[in-house]
Image (cartoon, rainbow, N blue to C red):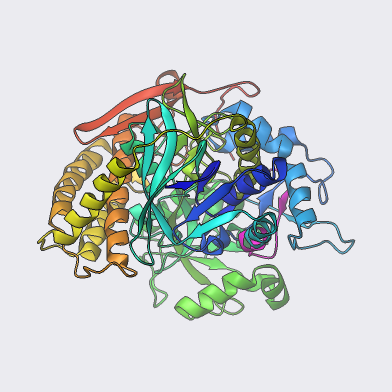
Amino acid sequence: MLNHDVIIIGGGLAGSRAALEIARTDPSLSIALVAKTHPIRSHSVAAQGGIAATLKNIDPEDSWEAHAFDTVKGSDYLADQDAVEILTREAPDVVIDLEHMGVLFSRLPDGRIAQRAFGGHSHNRTCYAADKTGHAILHELISNLMRYGVTVYDEWYALKLILEDGQAKGVVLYRILDGQLAVMRAKAVMFATGGYGRVYNTTSNDYASTGDGLAMTALAGLPLEDMEFVQFHPTGLYPVGVLISEAVRGEGAYLINSQGRRFMEDYAPSRMELAPRDITSRAITREIRAGRGINPDGSAGGPFVHLDLRHMGKETIMSRVPFCWEEAHRLVGVDAVHEPIPVRPTVHYSMGGIPVNTDGQVRNSADDLVEGFFAAGEAACVSVHGANRLGSNSLLECVVYGRRTGAEIARYVQNRKLPDINEARYLTEVRSQIQALLDQPGTWRIAQLRQDYQDCMTEYCGVFRTETVMQEGIARLKELQQRYSQIRLDDKGSCWNTEIIEALELRSLMIVGEIILTSALSRQESRGSHAREDYPNRDDASFLKHTLAYYSPAGIDIRHKPVVITMFQPQERKY
């Protein structure tokens, strides 16, 4: 059995920031950081646009209260306002701390950290490192973890959360290199496993974003919160789906339809291209539906619109958003200095996740907490984003709540003993599960079943939703889930068997997808990213509350939790 004081599953921004805080607080603690990729290959490294904080370097009129109001309004009033206050109050401090660690932020001529405009924000408050901000932050965090001697288990896959008598005691792990199974126990377990974009067929997320932490939590009988709120980023590069950062629009790019019009004036005249993401994604989808999309030959009626940077000039493009230019050029052969970029909405971010309080402790109901279990980052739902996240608030959440959760864990584990675990029972259970996958004489290939599942989620639970369509989607999902017992693995070996990992990830996707669809069906209103064509209006009287979804193979049980309102009363959301 492997023993540590603390186990953190996930090597991205939230997990690494928590590990650093624990090590800083009490260097004597033994910390394990477990990641299924190398930590600097975590999806946080792909975050481009920036991290919001009221440093007031550009705009001295900015304040944490204005940042909080923008965040709550952007969330369509579903965010918990106590959590938003912590996020926005602590933002300047965590950014300065990152700078002191060595993060190479872009600078103003006088040497202060540069700040740019971002969608839904009323002031220029987004700090950035060109358009590679996540990359810049994560590399420094991992360097610091090496300095503090944190034990990194890279390329280990977490199979199961060990939860007994309301207490998280450890995890069962699979080493991808050689198939070794291990039980790891600790005084505290933290999940920072990121999002689940691979539930859908077109996403900005990397191939590792399969919702494993959420699925393990659901399988342990704990709820997931607000899973119906899936963020579609307006500008996914067509047809590949990778992100063209909001930073491009923050620097002044235009969205253009087949008529050559900046159509956002019809949807958000005060903010134009810098409206919140849910509004901009719906606007693009409506333009395409109305026949004002563009075809590859330039004719009308196609599946995308244009993101036009040409007026910005080569110098601005190459200094401020070089990675976006490179992606468009490398992947679809578009030189953005001279040609517009084809874009359409792509699945990007999960507002929902594992419910936690503001110290990162996982909830098992609206009122009760799980002993020894913590979560932060995109995998968690402290609900600073509510029904729609503002750009540049996700890196901020990872750093603020990663730090805060790490501090709470360091306090929590003092004077606690390692829990008792029946190691043999868990190893036997997981070994038989993997052997059953290897022995299955199935007919379905993993890739085909995964593609069918992703297509189903995209078709039946997309930007716009209706009850009829989602009911069909659930029926279709159930059919596809039946096929899981008929998948066939060709690789029967133990050395670097990626087929086993793909089979386990597919199980995670299937659990998470069903929870998303069922939660979306139960919310009979439109709010933020959840747009119901059969219920087009927001309904505060019935649905100003969080969804808690409990998974079981027999079905999903939906309960609710109140929204914390401390500063801003809900009002109509206009831009």
Left or right, residue 128 beside residue 215: right
Q: In this view, does 534 lie above or below 250?
A: above
Give the image location of residue 458, x and y in percent.
31, 53
Q: Residue at x 51, y 45 (%)?
A: 7
Residue 173 in the magenta stretch? The answer is: no
Residue 127 in the magenta stretch? The answer is: yes
Residue 410 falls in image quadrant: top right
Residue interval drawn in magenta: 121-137
Give the image location of residue 358, x and y in percent.
59, 30
Viewer-side residue, 317 vs 227: 227
Viewer-side residue, 394 vs 544: 394
Task: For residue 125, say whether it is visible.
Answer: yes
Give the image location of residue 545, x and y in percent.
45, 24
Q: Is residue 210 above or below residue 317?
A: above
Task: For residue 392, say whether it is visible.
Answer: no
Outermost residue toward the right in this view: 110
Left or right, residue 293 beside residue 92: left
